[in-house]
Image (cartoon, rainbow, N blue to C red):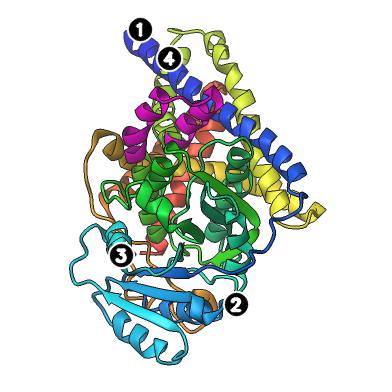
Amino acid sequence: MFFVYTCALLYFFGMVFIFLYSLAQGHLLLHFFKFKKESNQTPPQVPNSWPMVTVQLPIFNELYVVERLIDAVAKLNYPSELLQIQILDDSTDETGALIQAKVLAYPNLNFEYLHRKDRTGFKAGALKEALPSAQGEFIAIFDADFVPDPDFLMKALPYFSSPQVGMVQSRWTHLNQNYSILTQLQAFALDAHFLIEQQGRNQQGAFINFNGTAGIWRKSCILDAGNWHDDTLTEDLDLSYRAQRKGWKFVYRPEIESPAELPPILSAIKSQQFRWTKGGAECAVKHAGKVFQEDHPWHIKFHAFAHLFNSTIFIAILLTSFCSIGIWWGIHSDLISAKLMLATGFSMLGFFLVAGVYLVSYLKAKTFSWRRLAEAIWKLPLFFAVSMGFALHNSQAVWEGLTGKKSLFIRTPKFNLESGTVSLHSNVYRLRSLPMSTWLEGGMGLLFASMVVLGIVYGTYLFLPFHGLLALGYSLVFISSLRTR
């Protein structure tokens, strides 16, 4: 009896956390619609004279995409005498040779090649080490998998008309969205972040984040906020909070699009997810308490909490999924009444709020059509299932971040498969071995598939949809991991 009630209590608290997160998402959706109404305002005026800009390209072992990146940056529509391009190369393979050969094709551009043999601080360390030699008043940053719009600088720089603006972030779009169902589901998630969350936070003056790439910083803002730190895996989120806590304003512009490659295989997605979720948890430990102690409006603090702790949702999902098994057994054994669990019915409102966020973002990402609505309806439950299937993997990352366990910065491998010149099977960055967590995910798929069968056999249907999504999600994650190793 004690075990069953403990499971019920933990399940309840987990559902409360998920519900509070969903309220934050719903509030962002409300402000997204306000942002859309305000977006028709007159854009800022073009400056009388354009400033000096430094474009920084942090690189580490990018054989398949680095030449594409250099070609794209070389096409930036900006006065060449006002443009410095720093290539921050930490590579340990032949990428450096490709870079040095490629820049020779653009003798009229101001390229500066900086190679580090010691990767101290990883990406944050490279950015910090290069900053003193950056000649620009503004610093634009692009990761290796991006293909910036030629007019990116011309579109973004006018938003620095106020001296209080420290950073302007553009919206990521996707070069290979239709490559597979995995890339489609990633786009599904990222569009919600860039269309709903970023706009919703920015509209109400809440803290937003530089997304690590496809944005421009005022150099004085970086220095005033304390420069790049390497004590978290998300140096972009960390610097964003330090700058905004000091009073700098950030601007998010969804109409400025920056195309990028989505990881096409699950091992690459997992490495990216691990870094993002662990780094987010590290930043939560570093900043959440300070934000609450500082003089900010309540809605700023509420959204900062939801923002910094959003990855903790995976721990809540993992906790409630395990506890649901104990509760199911308690109901089946008449140790607990199913009516008691109706107290968690409020969570359904949260589910509809979160579903609304993803549905709206999917429909707003492109021109509305009934076909897109039909696609969204079947992709939504599949997205929720796969997200739940990441709960075990991402919970480990979040727990390490919250408890202070340090780990290396693991880059997300790039593939450039859409070019047709690169084979997935010959990719030298592809992970060949399977970690133990993958086999545990397979076990979780079997566990919750068994719970689905038991629920049907014994007529206890309360958790059937939840267990069904978990079984599907873990199974898909496991199978996809096997297929792409």
Magenta stretch holds residue 293: yes
For disc 2, the marked residue is: 77
For disc 4, the marked residue is: 8
Q: Is residue 279 above or below residue 11?
A: below
| First in residue order: circle 2 vs circle 4 | 4
For disc 3, the marked residue is: 132
Q: What residue type is disc 1 on?
A: Met
| First in residue order: circle 3 vs circle 2 | 2
| First in residue order: circle 4 vs circle 3 | 4
Residue at far left of view: 118
Label 1 neighbour load within 10 Å: few <14, some 14-19, many 20+:
few
Marks 3/1: CA–CA distance: 64 Å
Residue 356 appears at what percent x and percent y?
A: 67, 37
Query: Which residues are drawn in magenta?
Result: 281-308
Marks 4/3: CA–CA distance: 56 Å
| First in residue order: circle 1 vs circle 2 | 1
Residue 1's disc number: 1
